[in-house]
Image (tube, rainbow, N blue to C red):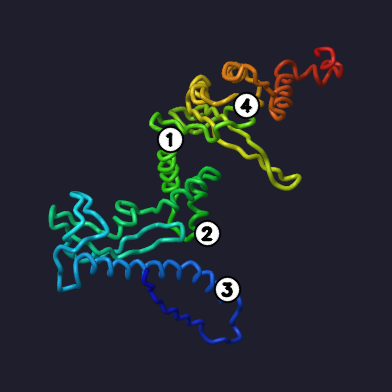
């Protein structure tokens, strides 16, 4: 691969009594964001010009019948392309490192007449304004914080122009790649040691209160220092706006785990016993005291405070 040589010129100004380290530090931070992007733009521009010369001949001296390392997206031809000039409007590409602006050269296929940009075709960027890496980064952020916050973090750290809408679209794009032909994700682990079943609510559907979402999480271990242990978790199944039977169909082929953890809800308990009848079931230690407290208050909260021995007598 041939090298592209770039020259960097920095004009910090004259040092005087008003100069401070913060100014130079800000300059370094700005350079760390801009220099790499401008270098990438110059490298791609140089490589693009060499590519066009190799398949179309030098400018003002076209050569017919030259082979190309790409194929026409319409007819599949790999020879005999004509130079069609370059666009004056720059193509903006949002990447994980920031926004890259490219001036794209176009060629025309002499067999079918199709005009296209070979650089975008070879890099897999035809019709895209956002790179795959940025899509994955935005999708990962959006699963941990809100879409608006994910866009803000991407703008602050990578200098992108990500928005809440782009974060939402990134999640949809990545989900489409992860799902199978039947629209399900498939188990994230073939045989987890522990399976945790639980339900929650999400903002979906027509109701202002949202709908129920059922989750199956696989646990395969833990790591980290004492006091800050982190579990190794894997998404095994997920349904939105459906009953537990729908989640059971996603878990039908999963081998029996060593333990199932749930909150004690009857429908979830029945599902676990039906899927893995020989697997022991453990009540979640968080749900157990909270559920017991709710039961006490729902039964008779006043008597519990007035008569100290009320709880003992009832138990």
Q: Nearer the viewer, mark 2 or mark 4?
A: 4
Q: Please, is residue 98 above or below residue 278 in the view?
A: below
Residue position marked by numbered label 1 in the rendering: 179
The crowding category of the residue bearing disc 1, from other C-alpha atoms within 10 Å (few below 14, some 14 to 19, many at least 20), is: few
Measure the C-alpha gap from mark 4 to mark 3: 54 Å
Of callouts 1 and 4, which one flags the residue occurring earlier in the amino acid sequence? 1
Residue 258 in sight from this viewpoint = yes
Measure the C-alpha gap from mark 1 to mark 3: 45 Å
Q: Secondary structure at mark 4?
A: loop
Residue position marked by numbered label 3 in the rendering: 25
Of callouts 1 and 3, which one flags the residue occurring earlier in the amino acid sequence? 3
Of callouts 2 and 4, which one flags the residue occurring earlier in the amino acid sequence? 2
The crowding category of the residue bearing disc 3, from other C-alpha atoms within 10 Å (few below 14, some 14 to 19, many at least 20), is: few
The crowding category of the residue bearing disc 4, from other C-alpha atoms within 10 Å (few below 14, some 14 to 19, many at least 20), is: some
- Toward the top, the furthest residue is 313
Q: Nearer the viewer, mark 1 or mark 3?
A: 1
């Amino acid at each position: 691969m041939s090298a592209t040589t770039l020259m960097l010129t920095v004009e910090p100004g004259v040092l005087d009594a008003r100069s401070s380290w913060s100014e130079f530090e800000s300059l370094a931070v700005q350079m760390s964001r801009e220099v790499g992007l401008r270098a990438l733009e110059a490298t791609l521009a140089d490589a693009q010009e060499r590519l066009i010369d190799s398949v179309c001949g030098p400018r003002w001296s076209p050569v017919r019948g030259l082979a190309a390392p790409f194929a026409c997206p319409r007819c599949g031809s790999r020879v005999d392309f004509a130079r069609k000039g370059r666009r004056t409007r720059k193509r903006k590409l949002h990447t994980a490192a920031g926004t890259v602006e490219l001036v794209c050269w176009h060629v025309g296929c002499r067999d079918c007449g199709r005009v296209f940009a070979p650089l975008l075709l070879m890099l897999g960027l035809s019709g895209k304004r956002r790179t795959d890496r940025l899509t994955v980064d935005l999708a990962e952020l959006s699963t941990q914080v809100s879409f608006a916050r994910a866009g803000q973090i991407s703008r602050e750290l990578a200098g992108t122009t990500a928005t809440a809408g782009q974060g939402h679209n990134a999640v949809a794009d990545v989900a489409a790649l992860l799902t199978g032909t039947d629209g399900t994700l498939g188990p994230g682990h073939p045989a987890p040691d522990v399976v945790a079943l639980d339900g929650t609510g999400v903002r979906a559907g027509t109701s202002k209160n949202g709908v129920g979402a059922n989750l199956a999480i696989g646990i395969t271990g833990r790591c980290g220092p004492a006091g800050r242990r982190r579990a190794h978790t894997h998404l095994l199944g997920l349904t939105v706006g459906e009953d537990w039977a729908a989640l059971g169909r996603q878990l039908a082929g999963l081998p029996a785990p060593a333990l199932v953890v749930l909150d004690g809800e009857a429908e979830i308990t029945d599902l676990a016993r039906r899927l893995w009848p020989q697997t022991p079931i453990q009540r979640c230690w968080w749900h157990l005291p909270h559920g017991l407290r709710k039961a006490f208050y729902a039964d008779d909260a006043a008597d519990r405070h007035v008569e100290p021995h009320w709880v003992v007598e009832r138990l």
